[in-house]
Amino acid sequence: MGAMIESKDLEFIKNVMGDRFGMMLELFIQDGNKYIRTIKEGLAENDVEKIRSPAHTIKSSAKQIGIKAIYEAAEKIEEVASQIQDQDQLNHYYGELSSMHEQLRASMEAVEPELRALMTNNDA
C-alpha cells in the first residue's frame, strides 16, 4: 500500500467486503468529496452542524478503511466544530477550520488515485 493507506486495515476490509470492495471504495471517494464540499458550504454559510456532521462521517469511514491522513484531518475539524457554541466562536475559528478543510480536501485528492488503483486491481 501507499504511504497514505494503512495496509492492515485495508486488507481486513477487503477480506470482509469481498466482491463489494471496489464499490465501497468508489462510494468512499464520491461521498467523501460530497462531504468535503458540504463542509465548505458550512463554512460559507456559518453553519456549524454542516461542518461537524460531515467531518464525523468522513472520519469514521476513513478510519475503517485505514486512511490516516483523512481520518486525522476530519477528526480535527469535528473536534473544533464541536466546541463552537456561537457565532463569535465560529468567527474566531473560521481561519483554522478553513485551513483544516483545505488539508482534508488535499488529502482526499492525494489518496484518490491510490484508491482507484486498488479498485482496478480488485476487478482483475
Image (spheres, helix red, strand yellow):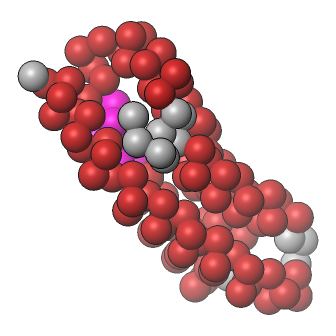
> Vertical placement of 90 versus 21: above or below?
below
Give the residues in magenta: 24-31
| Residue shown at 67% from the left, 52% from the top | 72
Q: Nearer the viewer, residue 72 or 30?
A: 72
Look at 30% across and 12% down and name the residue there: 18
Task: Count how many numbered circles sit on residues in the image.
Answer: 0
Magenta part, dominant SS: helix
* Residue 9 in sight: yes
Q: Is residue 88 left or right of residue 110?
A: right
Quadrant position of residue 103: bottom right
Q: Residue at x 80, y 58 (%)?
A: 79
Image position of 92 with respect to 24: above or below: below
Of the 4 image quadrants, the one containing the N terminus is top left
Front position in the image: 93 or 42? 93
x and y percentages locating residue 41 in the rendered image: 52, 76
Q: Is residue 29 magenta?
A: yes
Q: Quadrant of the C terminus?
A: top left
Is 38 on the left-hand or right-hand side of 81? left
- Image position, residue 20 (x, y; %): 27, 20
- Examine the rendered structure and indicate whether residue 105 appears above or below residue 124: below
